[in-house]
Amino acid sequence: MTTRIKKLSPISAVAAACLVSLSAIAASGPELVDLDGDGVISAEEIVQIRDEYKQTLLSAYDTDGDGELSRDERSAMRMARETEMLNTFDTDGDGELSRDERRAAHEERRAAMETQLDVNQDGVVSDEESAGFDSVKSERGRGHGRDHGRDHGGERGGEHGGKRSS
Ligand SMILES: [Ca+2]
Ligand SMILES: [Ca+2]
Ligand SMILES: [Ca+2]
């Protein structure tokens, strides 16, 4: 007796099909890749990928080309993202995301993230594999939003000593 394992869920099929569209990019976030091929996705790699992702979004939604996203441009981006979320996860087609649908979206993203982090594809995200992501995540959790104290008073009046006799 063989059990058929149905691995291809409709959701991931749709997600894969949507990779071409920019709104899909906006909805799904950047894909994490082990850029230097050392087997782990380091915090630096994640930062770099996110920066590039921001650039992608910027070039996609910066319609007036001034190099930043205005409020209108941002809301256009958000709309595209939401539409994409609906297209992908509104499984009952009622035009909004129920709690279950949101959860499914969340799960899907988490699964995708884990697949990406599992660089050696052994089905397990090891501590090494998740370390970079974890450190970026905790950093983001802490210093979110406001730029509080850009430089914490590094050099204050440093005229000190330095007598030289030649
Ligand atoms: Ca790496
Ligand atoms: Ca729905
Ligand atoms: Ca792994």
Image (cartoon, rainbow, N blue to C red):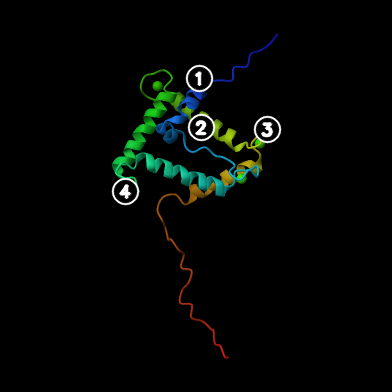
Mark 4 or 1, nearer chain start: 1
What is the number of the mark on residue 66? 4
Q: Quick one: SS at disc 3?
A: loop
Q: Residue at x 54, y 32 (%)?
A: 112
Q: Is residue 112 visible?
A: yes
Q: Quick one: SS at disc 2?
A: helix
| Circle nearer the viewer, 3 or 2 | 3
Query: Where does residue 62 sit, x and y in percent of width and height?
Result: 34, 43
| Circle nearer the viewer, 2 or 1 | 1
Say which residue label 1 marks: 10
Q: CA distance from mark 4 to mark 3?
A: 45 Å
Which quadrant: the C terminus? bottom right
Mark 4 or 3, nearer chain start: 4
- Is the CB of mark 1 within 8 Å of ligand 2? no
Check whether the beta carbons of the residues at disc 2 and disc 1 lie within 8 A of each other.
Answer: no
- In this view, the residue farthest toward the bottom is 166
Query: Where does residue 20 sit, x and y in percent of width and height?
Result: 45, 30
Say which residue label 2 marks: 109
Location of ligand 2 given as a quarter of the image: top left
| Circle nearer the viewer, 4 or 3 | 4
Say which residue label 3 marks: 122
Mark 2 or 1, nearer chain start: 1
